[in-house]
Image (spheres, rainbow, N blue to C red):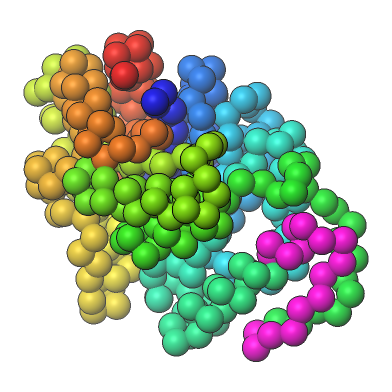
Amino acid sequence: MPISIGVFDHMDSGDSPPHVLYENRLKLIEAYDAAGFYGYHVAEHHQTSLGMAPSPGLFLAAAAARTRRIKLGPLIYIVPAYSPLRLIEEICMLDHLSKGRFQFGMGRGISPFETAFHGVRAEDSHAMYREAVDIVLKGLTQETLSHTGKYWSYANVPMVLRPFQAPRPPLWYGPSNAEGAAMAAERKLNIVINNPRGLARAINDAYLESYTKTHGAGGKPMMGLVRHLFIGETDEEALRIATPAYRRWKLSHVELWRRMGTDNHLWPEQLDEAIAKDGAIVGSPETVANEINDAMKVSGCNYLVGRFAFGNMSYQDTRQSVDLFIKDVMPNIV
């Protein structure tokens, strides 16, 4: 099974002002595009240094203008914070601006604090998410939109702007268990998994079982495995550069949670723990290639999604890592 390569980006602030951060990320995306990467996925976060692309569509429009092949999309849109009708129009615009390279995920958002800042109560977020997804998918595939729900209602709204891709751009979902994987398979959604490779295999097995039962054995969507990735000339160099950058990323990840007197324990505090718990792959090209090959084989995934830029890692260090990955790791991924 051929392995595709992609990127997941929180775009945490690091030490750069936003205009420098954006330009450096765009230069990296140009490099991903030139190297034949499949996709670039950007997170949406609000009122935290974890996410400096709170309006992901704006950044992706700029990325679309500077690339030619790479797929682009948010992973995810925090849909309770949007007008569904407005979101439908944005998706259509981005699909045309990218000439059919737009792909996207939708969710309710992992942080109740971020959505609360935008007027969404935690007890409403799941129901709002489910209703908004129904509206968006109807609006992308129908000539008029009608919907009567708890949070939004529309009557015979003309869908003048239609997607470039028919019937709509591809959708992504991040299951964390077998139930979520089965739901994604039934709806033909691509998936991305953050779990350790053994648990990822169980999720993928449930996904494939449901997919085959519902759709038959042909043409399976993409199954992504997400990892922090950093490559140095040696294992020692890679760890020296990536360790403080990972720590800065982790502090950004929990910044808002800790300010609110709680915590988010999804990610280890230090890089060595993240490596031990199978959340990061760091080292020389040989070390990284061997670890990737094992992770993809054990997990059964067909799409490697790397967090190449994170924390306060400099553009120069990130670019050197990406260049080493393209030159010395990609040819050895089997």
Residue shown at 82% from the left, 51% from the top: 162
Q: Position of residue 5 (x, y in %)?
A: 42, 29
Answer left or right for 102 relative to 145.
left
| Magenta-highlighted residues | 136-151
Residue 34 visible within the image: yes
Residue 174 visible within the image: no
Residue shown at 44% from the left, 28% from the top: 4
Q: Position of residue 9 (x, y in %)?
A: 42, 43
Quadrant housing residue 255: bottom left
Q: Position of residue 122 (x, y in %)?
A: 44, 83
Say which of 13 and 94 sits in front: 94
Residue shown at 52% from the left, 45% from the top: 216
Q: Is residue 137 magenta?
A: yes
Q: Is residue 133 magenta?
A: no
Task: Work out which quarter of the rendered image holds the N terminus and state it.
Answer: top left
Say which of 114 and 68 sits in front: 68
Task: Work out which quarter of the rendered image holds the C terminus and state it.
Answer: top left
Quadrant housing residue 179: bottom left
Answer left or right for 138 relative to 170.
right
Residue shown at 55% from the left, 57% from the top: 187
Q: Position of residue 249 (x, y in %)?
A: 28, 49
